[in-house]
Image (cartoon, helix red, strand yellow):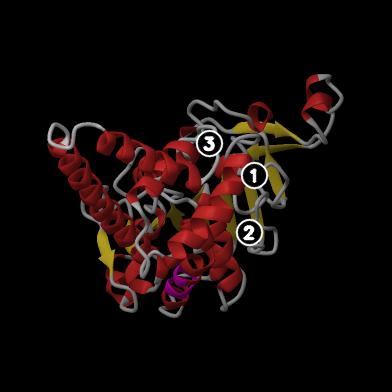
Amino acid sequence: MKFVTTITAVILPLLLLLATKPIDARFLRYIWKNVIKNKPVENDYTSIQQDAVENYNALVQQDPVENYNALVQQDKAVDEEITQSAEDLMYSDRRSIFVDGTSLDFVYWNSDLGNNKPIIIEFGNEKQIINHWIRGKPLKVITHGWLGSDENDKGVFSIKTAYVDAGGFNIITADWNRVASNIIYPMPAFFTSEVGSIIAKLLENVVNLAVIDPSDIHIIGHSLGAHVSGACGAAFSLGKIGRITGLDPAGPGFEYVSLRSDHLDDTDATFVDVIHTAIGTAGYSKPLGHADFYPNEGKPPQPGCLESYTPSAIAKLSTECPSWDDYTSGGCKNNNKSYMGHDADPK
């Protein structure tokens, strides 16, 4: 909690100013070592400045001739670190500040095209996929979370591969890596609503092609992508999205140390199902949808969790229960049962 609070209170405001105000490299290094790597915070920036001055003075008090080269090397190293750190983080930050249709990469897939010949969708020119569209089949839209991209086919996009292999689906992957790749988590977390709105506009353009009804659209999002999916459903203006599945929705910035109030919820689609797999760490713990699943109490580790979602996976039968303790004590054995994952049923 202390880690996330520090991230929100300190780093987000700094990065919002970073485009015009470079930050001292010693300060950046301090944040990285003590905050990003979740090490105990050591006093504040004042102590860092004092340490630097003390180290510098110690060299000056020694023989100036003997230590001249050491002073030169120290100044050179600090100058280089300031320049590189500022340039790297400024570039990363600027990619995240402005979000529009060019910030995302959309790709269309189906079983006829296979996993090696997809169609890249130009935002605003969605009609290019009409000739490849499988009529009468549902649409799966898949998106990733923080630091993710569609280049990692072992992450959430393994689900895309499974749907392509199973056949009978239209699939669109939404890669928002230009925003999500920012290592300072609050930045992509803050922009989930904007990213979701862009996906919603693309889906509206696809619906206007008369190839799909909103009720046949199913959006699947992992981590921050779950909230992106919810934002997409909330922004979609041509009816109600049929289904949204949130896979381990992110907790930081939404459930605690809130950056946004508009997280995934049961108003974002006709049916919203959520699988919680990291509560107590990075995942959202409270129920968010019409059906919330907590495999293995919803806590990590969860080996094979993404693979278990795919249409080819063996369906996981779940039991409705108010708590894990009630479940383990046998108090819910006669309660309603429901499948988790691809086969989840709103009924």
Task: Work out whether mark 1 precedes mark 2 in sequence or the reverse, and give the earlier one.
Answer: 2
Residue shown at the point (29%, 61%) measured from the top left: 91
Q: Which residue is mark 3?
A: 42
Q: Is residue 199 magenta?
A: yes
Marks 1, 3: nearer the viewer = 3
Q: Which element type, helix, strand or loop, lies under badge 2?
A: loop
Q: Nearer the viewer, residue 237 or 187?
A: 187
Q: Quadrant of residue 295?
A: top right
Q: Is label 3 in a helix, a strand or a loop? A: loop
* Residue behind mark 2: 263
Q: Earlier in the sequence, mark 2 or mark 3?
A: 3
Residue 47 in the image: state x and y as whole percent.
48, 42
The amino acid pointed to by label 2 is His
- Real-space Cα separation, disc 1 to disc 3, in angstroms: 29 Å
- First in sequence, mark 1 or 3: give its number: 3
Q: Label 2 near label 1: C-beta < 8 Å? A: yes
Q: Which residues are magenta?
A: 198-202
Asked whether 231 falls inside the magenta stretch, the response is no
**Callout 1 secondary element:** loop
Residue 106 lies, with reference to residue 32, above or below; the image says below
Image position of 238 (left or right of 78) = right
Q: Amino acid at mark 3?
A: Glu
Residue occupying the point 72% across, 45% down: 286
Tag 3: Cα neighbours inside 10 Å, few (<14), some, or many (≥20)?
A: few
* Left or right relative to 26: residue 291: right
Residue at mark 1 to residue at mark 2: CA–CA distance:
10 Å
Residue beneath label 1, please?
284
The residue lying at 57 percent from left, 51 percent from top is 245
Left or right position of 220 against 66: right
In front: label 2 or label 3: 3
Q: Is residue 138 visible?
A: no
